[in-house]
Amino acid sequence: MKLLSALVAVLTVSCASAAITVRFPKLKRDGTSALSLSEANHYGSPAPFVPGWYYGNTPSLAPDLPWLKDKSLCATLNSNAASLHCPNFPLTYLKPTRRQDTTNPQPSQVPPPPSGVYTPTFTGLTGAIQADDYITFGLVDTVQDCEQMCDGVSGCAFFNTYHDVNGKDGSPLLTCSLYASCHGAELATNTGGQTQPDGSVNFITDSDGYCKA
């Protein structure tokens, strides 16, 4: 009986590890999801050519990225003040309180950040923004999804969406890059040109920029 119990335990751990490795491989490497998606490493995308997350409705289109609509992942992320937060999911970390304030206990949930009002600074370009105030980037389904990501990331004042056509079998996903300052078309200088593993050369289309008012 002890041998059987031990075998079941080993299989359970092995299956759990396999699930984590397949579902969110980047989180497995960094140890914990909160640390993997923190400001310290640009929320999972320290290199501005490797996306850190996916926020949309079809996770099968980005199977190697943390899906920011996965309930168990979002529960972990949104309970940590320092991590990337899933839009439209309750924030459950506690705000710091003053020691002497015992009359007004803090709520168990933190109010979501207010939605921004965005003004387009350019549309339809064939280049993406390159700037030193880069915060993070990932993949989304729509421009509105990227807007929600900018609303939820501290310090985000501008986002750039575009199609990076790079041999990924005609993926419909948009790249969503977030920045701390607003930018115009003069900095949309990343036009692609990198050779892909299949021999094709990537290029940029439908690049739009939006500044938060």
Image: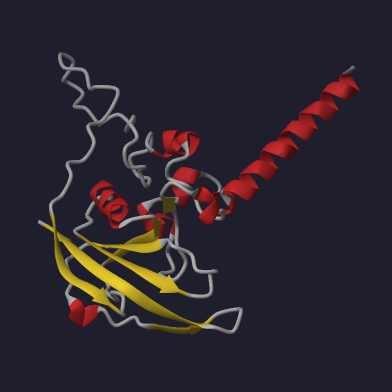
Quadrant of residue 79 within the rendered picture: top left
Q: Residue at x 19, y 82 (%)?
A: 186
Q: Residue at x 28, y 74 (%)?
A: 129
In the image, is residue 164 above or below residue 117? below
Q: Residue 169 location in percent, x, y?
A: 55, 69
Q: Is residue 131 left or right of residue 163?
A: left
Q: How many marks?
A: 0
The answer to whether any part of residue 110 appears in the image is yes
* Residue at the far left in the pictured view: 213
In the image, is residue 78 above or below residue 148? above
Name the image quarter holding the N terminus. top right
Q: Residue 100 location in percent, x, y?
A: 16, 20
Quadrant of residue 108 within the rendered picture: top left
- Between residue 155 and residue 165, name the one nearer to us: 165
Q: Residue 80 location in percent, x, y?
A: 38, 38
* Residue at the far top in the pictured view: 103
Q: Residue at x 53, y 74 (%)?
A: 167
Q: Is residue 147 left or right of residue 104?
A: right
Q: Is residue 193 left or right of residue 89?
A: right
Q: Residue at x 56, y 49 (%)?
A: 24
Name the image quarter holding the C terminus. bottom left
- Which colour style is shown? secondary structure
In the image, is residue 75 above or below residue 161? above
In the image, is residue 155 above or below residue 57? below
The answer to whether any part of residue 62 appears in the image is no
- Between residue 73 and residue 55, name the one nearer to us: 55
